[in-house]
Amino acid sequence: MWTPQILDETSSYDDLITGKIPALIIPEVLSKFDCVSLSRKILKISQRNSSSTKFGTSLSSHIYEKQKYFSKSQKSNKILKNLFTENISPVTLMQQKISKLFGKKIYTATENGNVYSDAVIRIHESEDSVHLHRDNSNFEMSEYNVSQMKNQLSAILYVQSPVEGGELTIFHKMWSKKDEMMRVPEFGYSSDLIKGICQTKIKPIAGNMVILNPKFYHQIESISGLKPRITFGFFFGESSKDCFYSWT
């Protein structure tokens, strides 16, 4: 069985890197009350911004536009900061949990005085899903210094659960360069890559944080119901034995 590990004293960083476990689940990073309060704020801002379903900037949207990326990340970080004026930032809580769990300090990455995006908030609504993909800044983001970070992982905090669906499915297959032959631009990878491959599904439970190795293929299942699936997410990697840096 290839199953996620719930946080305990034996939780292993190496097990995530190697894929011995598909993910680590850290329960109740945010309380139910904070999840409800934050979800309301995010959805109000979304409505004011023509029902925007993403807040924050990501490298994947600006692979060859470094100046534009850093300009946008400065603006999006301000939006996130304003969102948390009354409470501690979920991003800070996520970083604190990661630091304590793995015994390393963690900071948002910087490059030549420019600050990377702190996090991305994503809103997935009814009938939304995300195709089969993997995330690999080492391979695709060579224009950016974070591409040099070792052992890159992904952290996702669920802020609101949908009525049904929205599970994160992780397949026990790590990306390799030859897989690019099976890639369809804008639509991820062919499902032929994961035929017969062991998989695990993680329910989007509000308040929980999931850490995974994003080089393993994964997808988000279709959502149903009136409640959107809302998440915070960022990547992080090692710059030294005792320090992580995060980015989106």
Image (spheres, rainbow, N blue to C red):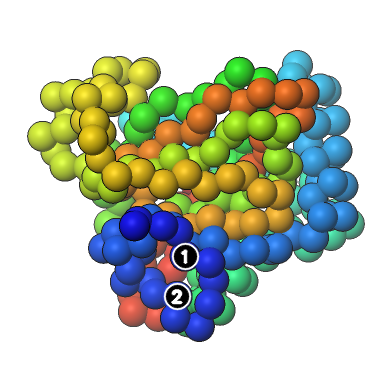
Where is residue 228 drawn, in percent x and y? 71, 30
**Foreground: 69 or 48?**
48
- The residue sitting at 56% across, 50% down in the picture is 156
Q: At which x and y percent is residue 99?
A: 53, 75
Left or right? Give the position of 163 relative to 155.
Answer: right
Disc 2 designates what residue? 11
Task: Depth check: give the residue in front, 225 or 190.
Answer: 225
Q: Tell me residue 164's x, y (percent).
A: 66, 31
Q: Is residue 94 above or below residue 190?
A: below
Q: Secondary structure at mark 1?
A: strand
Q: Is residue 217 left or right of residue 228?
A: left
Circle 2 sits in a helix, a strand or a loop, which is it?
Answer: loop
Inspect this view and state whether residue 92 appears: no
In-image side of 216 versus 114 (left or right) = left
Q: Earlier in the sequence, mark 1 or mark 2?
A: 1
Return the residue found at the far front.
1
- Name the mark on residue 179: none
Q: Decide: marks 1, 2 in contact (CB < 8 A)?
A: yes
Q: Callout 2, which amino acid?
A: Ser
Q: CA distance from mark 1 to mark 2?
A: 7 Å
The N terminus - image quarter: bottom left
Q: Nearer the viewer, residue 142 or 235?
A: 235
User: Is residue 118 placed above or below 61 in the rendered structure?
Assistant: below
Amino acid at dot 1 = Gln
Label 1 neighbour load within 10 Å: few <14, some 14-19, many 20+ = some
Q: Check disc 1 and report the residue beneath it.
A: 5
Residue at screen point 17% across, 29% down: 180
